[in-house]
Amino acid sequence: MKIHSIKTRLLIAILSPLMIFLILYTVVNYSLVDSIYSDEVDSHARQVVVGFKTGIDGYFRNARQIPVILGRIMENSPDMPENRIDRTIQGILGKNGDVYGSCVAFEPYGYRPGSFHMMRYACRDTSKTPAEVGIVNLDFSTYRYHEYEWYGETKRKGDFYWTKPYYDAGCGDVIMVTGSEPFFDRAGNFMGVATVDVTLDYINTILSRISLSQNSYAFAVDREGNFLYHPEYKPSFVKGRDVKTIAMKNIKNFPQLSALREAIHAGKKNEVQHTDVVLSGEDYVVYHTRLATTGWTIGIFVPGHELFSGSKLFLLALTISFFVIVLAALIVFFASKNILSPLQRIRDTTTEISGGNLCQEIEVITDDEIGIISGHFNEMIKNFRELLTKMRDAVKTLGDSIQEMNVSSKEISSTANQQAASVKEIVTTMEDSDALAKTISGRIDEVARMANQNRDFVENGFAIIKESLGKMDEISKTNDETINGIRALGELIDNIWEIVNIINGVADQTKIIAFNAELEASSAGESGKSFMIVAGEIRRLADNIVASTGEIQSKIDEIQKSSDYLLSASEKGTVRIKTGWDLSVKLRKVFEEILGTSESSAESAGRIATTIKQQVMAFEQILLTLKQISNGIDDFVVSTKSTAATSETLHAMSEEMRKIIDRYII
């Protein structure tokens, strides 16, 4: 079956949206059902945990009634004989087969004066079948019951108390917990404790029945997080002679259960919680709740893929969808085969017609849309046969006319080619003349340009000479001013010499006065000592002034020498400036003569260039006209060649059309 056939496309057009619809329907339906299923599974799991919680709490409540009843009996009959106490305990155990043991224990000297210990205990001996209830006589020299949890905590709290699990080596070697109820005398004073012992084996039996899937399992932890029941985290025990508290595996020692530990710590008594944990790389869902009686937590670990698995439901939905698609495909296939059979006959007939046999017609056997199309197609073939007959005659006539036009076009093309060759020779000669004239014009333009450029250079040089003369004049004036300034500086230096001489005279007089003052001060004795110091300082200052004026004199000498040298150099510069001025004046006269000659040359070159350009323009006009004539002849030649080629093409087309028409059987 071809992919492009109508049958295939019909199947695809119908089945594609159907498949998409069924897939979407399956996915949506699965999602809805899976959601409902998940909610139902979650609700069922919670109900299972609540059911077992109710059963275990009920068991502990019933067990609690035993010490409560014994306590009330002891309060009403505190002086009851020992044998009667034994019978009472045994009778209670006989009626409660799921209870391991029970006792009544008194405070020291509380039962009778002179008797420190008084405890009556009965339990089931599980080593016998069936288990027998018997009285256990304990050795109080080693078994100090007042120190044990079941007695001490109950006395301290003054209320009922469940102990931690412990190992009993005294009667049946079992793990158990003890529930203790205090009893009091009429004055309200504490008298002792009545107890009931419950084995964990019974609790484990109940927990082992909890199951939600193939690999789910139950667990139980006490108030402190110690595992009481778990398939892996089982307690390890060491048997001894007496009843001892045992070490249990604690949940806090397992990091993978940290989320469960936190949830247990925050949980409430009557609430079933849902916690997700990962154990050995597998997701688990833990449902757990707290017992109202003992405060323990019980629950169940369920693998996540087992709890919320809906693969069977999804597979069923896919199977149904697959069968619906197959059924729809079969229906569409047979229906399309019945509908498309007339089209098959039309295809066979059109294949014959496409091969050139126009005598074929489609057999019309129905009056539906396909029959109407077949009739119209037969009419179209009839009209096509008539059209081909007329075209055959027209093609014959057209071929003869084209042949005659082709011969004429070739003769005209030959004559036009000869004329075009003659005109091209004339154009070539004119182009050479025009090129020569343009070359001469270019050379003349270059001469004129150089003459103008030379004139510009001369004008620029003349302007520079003028500017140089102005600058030389300014330099001469500036040099004169400099010489005058240097001479004025010499006069000022002479004045400074006079001032320095005056300062030296004053300094010498000051030194003489200071020396005389020192002589007078020395003759004055002690009273003139201070004045002598001042006179010494004045003389030292005068010496410094003389030294400073000496330095000033040396500097003035240096300045005087430099001034004289500068004056001499400036006077020599004045002579050279004068010489330069005279040369610049002569150079200006020479440039004036050159400028006149350059202007005359530039005017003559310009007139010659104008004349040559006029001649070049005349040659170009003649050449343009000849080129237009040549292009016209070339166009005519091309036109005649095109006409000849067109006639050849038309002749070939007429021959091809004749061959095509001859292919059909009319």
Image: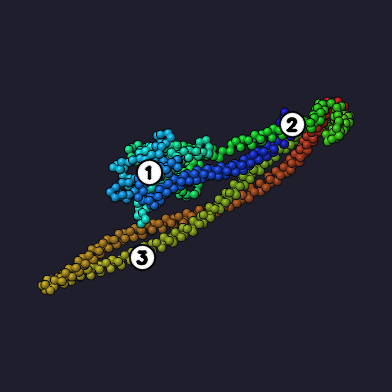
Q: Camera-side residue: 29 or 561?
A: 29
Image coordinates for residue 554, horizontal then vertical, percent? 27, 61
Q: In which quarter of the image is residue 551?
A: bottom left
Q: In which quarter of the image is residue 529?
A: bottom left
Local packing at callout 2 (Cα closer than 10 Å; few below 14, some 14-19, many 20+) is: some
- The dot on residue 333 is 2
Give the number of marks. 3
Image coordinates for residue 316, horizontal then vertical, percent? 63, 35
Instruction: Look at the numbered disc 2 and give the secondary structure of its residue.
Output: helix
Identify the residue shown where x is 61% and y is 35%: 315
Q: Camera-side residue: 647 or 245?
A: 245
- The dot on residue 488 is 3
Identify the residue shown where x is 33% and y is 40%: 137
Image coordinates for residue 404, horizontal then vertical, percent? 86, 29
Q: In which quarter of the image is residue 342?
A: top right
Q: Which of marks 2 and 1 is in front?
A: 1
Q: In this view of the protein, can residue 384 be seen by the observer?
A: no
Local packing at callout 1 (Cα closer than 10 Å; few below 14, some 14-19, many 20+) is: some
The residue where tag 1 is placed is 86
Q: Disc 2 vs disc 1: Cβ atoms closer than 8 Å? A: no
Label 3 to label 1, Cα distance in Å?
154 Å
Q: Camera-side residue: 503 or 485?
A: 503
Q: What residue type is labelled 3?
A: Ala
Choose the circle earlier in sequence order: 2 or 1. Answer: 1
- The dot on residue 102 is none
Instruction: Look at the numbered disc 3 and give the secondary structure of its residue.
Output: helix
Label 2 to label 3, Cα distance in Å?
132 Å
